Image: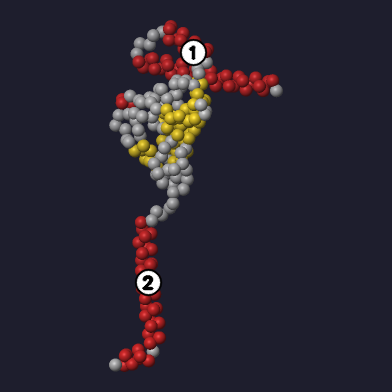
Amino acid sequence: MNNELNHSKNPIKLSFFWIVVYAIIAMSILVVVSMVANQYRTHTLPTGDITLTIPYSKYAVGETINFTIKNNFNSSIYLINNCPSEPLGVYKLINGEWIRQHDQASRYDCPNEQRQVTVGPGGTVDGDFAPWTNLFSQPGKYRIVAFVEYYNSLPYQDLEVVKMPDSASNSQTQANTASTPITTSTQNTSTINNISSANTSVRSEDTIKSNKEGNDN
């Protein structure tokens, strides 16, 4: 009876009391929800980039092209292994347009390989195009592009493939005519050495031109 009398005498005071109580309850619920959400939220946002590098900007036809992909993010990235298809996207500049090039490696070149390659923060992965001999078989300008899952930007590198100098080609022909390899291993070694000599000739020509220009000046 007394409570009812007090309520009838002070209705505003009682209403204010319940408003405060509800406000405290609402704030408590918001704090709990925020704490639960923080448990599922990524603690650090991904920051950084992905870089694709190749050793040189110019290669001779037949030379193996190597590449390195580095993950500069603070979280892991994932690369898809499409072997026997080419490991990265390869484009050739034809009539002012970049045209995608394709090649297939032998099924023996990719046995039991992982289809998804994980690269941790700061990690790198190396590869080459040795099994895909037709990708860079013709002289021209090429672009190598790395496709990374959930990464919108496309890291790429441009390079030029040039014809093997005539002197290097003649040396290679004479060497092949003079001696026939006995084993497959010897043949591969001979080919690699000849290509390396050709590549040295290609880059030597650039050096000779630079020295000549310096002397003229």
Direction top: furthest residue? 178
- Which residue is denoted by mark 2 in the rendering? 26
Instruction: Give me the residue at 39% from left, 17% from top.
Output: 188
Tell me which amino acid carries mark 1. Answer: Ser
Task: Give the residue type that dot 2 points to.
Answer: Ala
- Closer to the camera: disc 2 or disc 1? 2
- The disc, 2 or 1, on the residue closer to the chain's N-terminal end is 2
Q: Is residue 141 visible?
A: no
Give the vertical position of 133 relative to 51 (above or below).
Answer: above
Whether tag 2 and tag 1 are in contact, CB under 8 A, the answer is no
Query: In the rendered image, which quarter is residue 101 located in?
Result: top left
Q: Could you tell me which residue is drawn at 44 percent across and 51 percent down?
A: 45
Q: Position of residue 85 (x, y in %)?
A: 36, 29
Going by the image, does 167 lie left or right of 41?
Answer: right
Q: Report the residue at 37% width, 78% height from top.
A: 21
- Residue 33, above or below 140: below
Find residue 178 and report its horizontal and vertical position in percent. Answer: 43, 6
Q: Which residue is farthest right?
A: 217
* Quarter of the N terminus within the rendering: bottom left
User: Which corner quadrant holds the C terminus?
Assistant: top right
* Circle on res. 27: none
Q: Residues within 10 Å of mark 2 (few under 14, many from 20)?
A: few
**Outermost residue toward the front?**
95
Callout 1 crowding tier (Cα within 10 Å): few <14, some 14–19, many ≥20 = some
On the image, which quarter does residue 10 sit in?
Answer: bottom left
Q: Position of residue 189 (x, y in %)?
A: 41, 17
Q: Which residue is mark 1?
A: 169
Residue 161, percent from left and from top: 50, 23
Q: In front: 141, or 169?
A: 141
Residue 96 is left or right of residue 46, and the answer is: right
Q: Is residue 76 above or below residue 186?
A: below
